[in-house]
Amino acid sequence: MTTTLRVLHVEDSPSDAKLVAAALRAIGRPLESLRVEDPDAMRAALASREFDLVISDWSMPKFSGPAALKVMQASGADLPFIIVSGTVGEELAVEAMRAGASDYVLKHNLQRLPPAVERELREHASKKARRQAENALRASNDRFRRLSESGIVGIVVADLFGNIHDANDAALQLFGYARDEVLKVKWPDMVPPDWQHQAAETLSMLATRGVSHLVEREMFRKDGSRVPILMGVAMLDHPECIVFVADLTERKRVEASLRISESLKAGMIDDALDAIIAMDAQGKIVAFNPAAERTFGHSRDAVLGRTVAEVIVPERLREEHLRGMQRYFATGAGTLIGRRLELPALRSDGTELTVEMSIARVATAEEPICTAFIRDITDRKRA
C-alpha cells in the first residue's frame, strides 16, 4: 500500500496552493496538504499532527519563507523544507538553504517539484536512519563504558594469539597487575595447566560461533595464586575478542562453607560439646559450630569469611600462626596436623583462655580444608 504524502504548505494564495498540489500528485502517492499563512497557524499545525515535509512561499503579506523556516526549527520538527516561489532570487535562495532550507523551486517551473520532493524525502530518510544508527552506537558505547567503569565485571580485550590489548580496572584488580604490566602478559600464561583443555574448547567455539559459553575456571594471578572466575568470550573484529570475567572467590567460599556445614550436620557435630572450626587455605573460617560460639563469644555469621588468626589467636602469636599456615598449605609440611596441643586463645571480649586443640585435614574437591577441634581447659589448668 502506497503511503500518504503529508505536506504542510505555507502559502497565502489558494490558487497557487492548488497548482502545487497538482504538481505533487505526479509523484503517485495519496496527498494530504494543509495550507497555513501565518506563524500561529503553522505552530498549531506542527504541534497537532505529523508531516513529511514543509513547502513554503518566499514572500507573503503576513509571513515569509525565512520566518517559516525559523518556526519549523523552533518547533523541533526535523522535516525537509522546500521553498516554492516566483519572487525569490538565486542569492536569497542560497542564503535560505544555508539557514536550513532543503531546496527551492520557482513557481513557473513546477515540473521540477516532484523530483525535488522525492530526492529530499530519500535523503531525509537516509539521514534519519544514519542518525538513529549513530545514536544507537553511542548508547551502546555508553552502556559498555558504564559497565567497564562499574567494577562489577572484569573486561579484557585480547586477540586469538594470546596478546592482551586492554583491561579495565576491575580486571586489573582481580589479576593483580598494573595496566602497563598486563599488556606484556600472554593470556595462555595465566591459565593453569589443568585448565588448558577448557581454553582450547573456548578457542574452538570462538572460531565456529564467534562466542563462547559461560564457563567456570581458574586463572593465575600475578603472584601465582589462583582465582576462580566465571568467564565469557565474544569476537570483536577478527582476531580481537573481548573477555568478561567475574570473581567467584566469595561464591566458592560460601559453597564450601555450606558443604562443610552440611557435613558437620550430617555427622551430628553441631551437637558436639567441643568447639569445631573449619578454615580454608587462606585461613578463613568456613564453619563455626555452636560450641565454638559459646567458647569464643562470637556468632557464626559474624566470623564466617574472617581469618582464624584475627578471631581467636592472640595478637602476639598471629604472625607465627600465619607463617605456619602458609608453610603447610604451600608444602604440606606442618607441626600442628594430627597433634594434640595446649595453646592460648582469645575470646570476643579480649580475655584469654587455654585450649586443647587438634587439627585434621578435610578432603574437598576444590582446595584443602582444615578442621580444628578445640576444648576449653582453662578451669582444669587453673585447678
Image: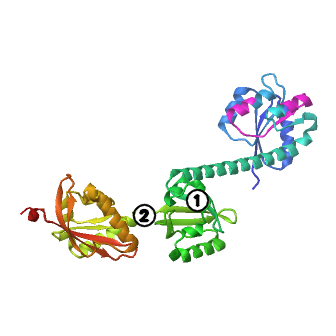
- Label 1, residues with CA under 10 Å away: few <14, some 14-19, many ≥20: many
Q: Nearer the viewer, residue 261 or 359?
A: 359
Quick check: can you spot residue 301? Answer: no
Q: Position of residue 119 (x, y in %)?
A: 84, 46
- Label 2, residues with CA under 10 Å away: few <14, some 14-19, many ≥20: few
Residue underneath mark 1: 182
Instruction: Farthest residue to the right: give it.
Output: 108
Q: Which residues are magenta?
A: 70-95
Residue underneath mark 2: 249
Quadrant housing the C terminus: bottom left
Tell me how far mark 1 sits from mark 2, CA to CA.
21 Å
Residue drawn at 92 percent across, 42 percent down: 111
Q: Position of residue 169 (x, y in %)?
A: 54, 53
Per the image, label 1 sits on a secondary structure element best described as helix
Q: Does residue 159 show up magenta in the picture?
A: no
Reply above or below: 173 against 255.
above
Residue 336, quarter of the rendered image: bottom left
Q: Nearer the viewer, residue 46 or 102?
A: 102
Amino acid at pointer 1: Val
Q: Position of residue 189 (x, y in %)?
A: 57, 69
